[in-house]
Amino acid sequence: MLKVPSLMERNDLLSSIFEMLRANEIAVEDIPPVQDAKHYIVLGRASDNTAAALVHRFGRENIIQSRYGTHGDGEATFELFLDGKLDDHPLEQNFSQEKKQEIREKLEGSHVTIVHSVSGENTSSRALSLIQSLETLKEDYKVGSITLVVPHMGLTRADRKFFKKLKEAGVTINIKQDNARANAIMAKLVRLSGADRIVGMDFHSNSSKNDYRNVFNTNFKISYGMEMIVEGLAQAGKRLKDQTQLFKMVKTAHRNLINRSPRFPGDGAVFTSTNSILVSHLKTIFNSQAEIFSIRIGAPDGANKPKDSGMQRAREASEALIGYHDEAAMFKIAKERISSTKTRVIPEQSSAEVEGKICVLVDDIISSGSTQLQAARYLREKGASKIIAYAAHGVLINDSLRHLLEDEVIDEYWVTDTVPGVVEKWERLKQELAQEVQDGKLDGEKYTRMITKFTILPIANAVVDLVAKDHGSRMKTCPTLAWANDNPSNGHSKFPEMAA
């Protein structure tokens, strides 16, 4: 019986085929082995810090700067080779036509790691551009396998069905809303379009993670590697007199493939957190043991939901900061929705022993910031001396960033650059505020308070590590990928510093 290895690279598959054929005394001299299978990084929407770190670690020649975006009318677009520099893309790359053709040829049978955030305006259109890219790489360029590293995956909050409450004649009726399952639909589309593995950062909830596990940790679709096995067997079959034997081997190979789950080391859907980035930054600011132990961490809601992922995220951050689990080092806040746009803290289900303490609100997304503000007001009432609001994904819709900085209840906001657009928003707002000071419309002291309240923490190191792990499992089949930090082709003398 054919033994199919867990890694589905082309070399490994064909090697297994050769062993099987030799065991059956089938000549294979006419089937050449595949040499130097490439590993490319397709870089889409990412921050400048992340792009610079990838170039530094892996070399510019192994990275394809691609465009995931929308046309002016909102339609999705994908371009594998992006010439020049666009405002929302971090690199400038201009390959010659000869170089592009060389890459096209090497993409066949290669492994590709896509680094791309589905974020910003027109999120649904950007999601569709990702689907287009997966289909294009697999169908047109014949890429062997794809790992999708997504710093921020839009639509993860659309992870469950909601109930709308209607009150009529003193009776409350719950009406199920069926329009909030975009996350599950996106998971299926990503898988069906060609992604073999997904690595996500700070997904919104356990249910949003499970939508991806349900399709990536099972054999949702027959492996593309099966096509390689059939092709190899078909060539060998020219020397076979007994066609029944060939069909039997194909059937065995097929059964072995679809019975293996997942097809990569570890799970097909992997989820990681930016908690390490938060904790590292906390330790650089509050560097004494006394200060560390004066910090209280919690989520802005979820205390009334035992399985809430927000509470789990906050608990993990607290444990990482102090080195062990201590419920006394946390605060717990419960909230309820009172209308389609308003929520409130439930005091009787919340607890916070925070008198004179530094409080850190840990969340996955900050959009309008209303949830964080409500939680912060509750903590102020309990005597918190300082409040920091941290969110992995700084979505910050409309003018919410300015409104949050003008409000005095939260002392500082920290976000990462998983959403590249947050860097652009912040730069624009700083310019607007500086102009208002110059025009006499904004007080200088207020300006200083506002711009010192907001910090963007880069995820560059975390993304580089994720891509390195994805490559590391394929070292045998990707010998040409630049690896060392001192790679002479990358144009950098040292690792890029953290952005101010």
Image (cartoon, helix red, strand yellow):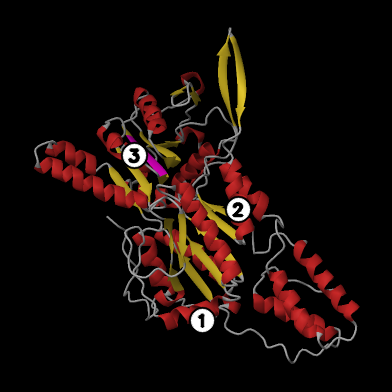
Q: Residues within 10 Å of mark 3 (few under 14, many from 20)?
A: few
Residue 388 shown in magenta: yes
Q: Nearer the viewer, residue 233 or 348?
A: 233
Query: Is 340 drawn above or below residue 404 in the view shown?
Result: above
Q: Could you say whether the residue bearing mark 2 is in a helix, strand or loop? A: helix
Query: Is 171 drawn above or below residue 493 in the view shown?
Result: above
Callout 3 amino acid: Asn
Q: Which residue is mark 1?
A: 480
Residue 406 is left or right of residue 380, and the answer is: left
Callout 2 amino acid: Leu
Q: Which residue is mark 3?
A: 398
Q: Nearer the viewer, residue 208 or 492?
A: 208
Q: Could you say whether the residue bearing mark 1 is in a helix, strand or loop? A: loop
- Reading the chain from its start, which is encountered first: label 2 or label 1? 2
How far across and down, in percent of the image, does residue 32 sit?
A: 68, 88
Quick check: can you spot residue 152?
Answer: no
> What range of the chain is rendered magenta?
387-391
* Furthest residue toward top: 169
Query: Is 429 drawn above or below residue 109 in the view shown?
Result: above
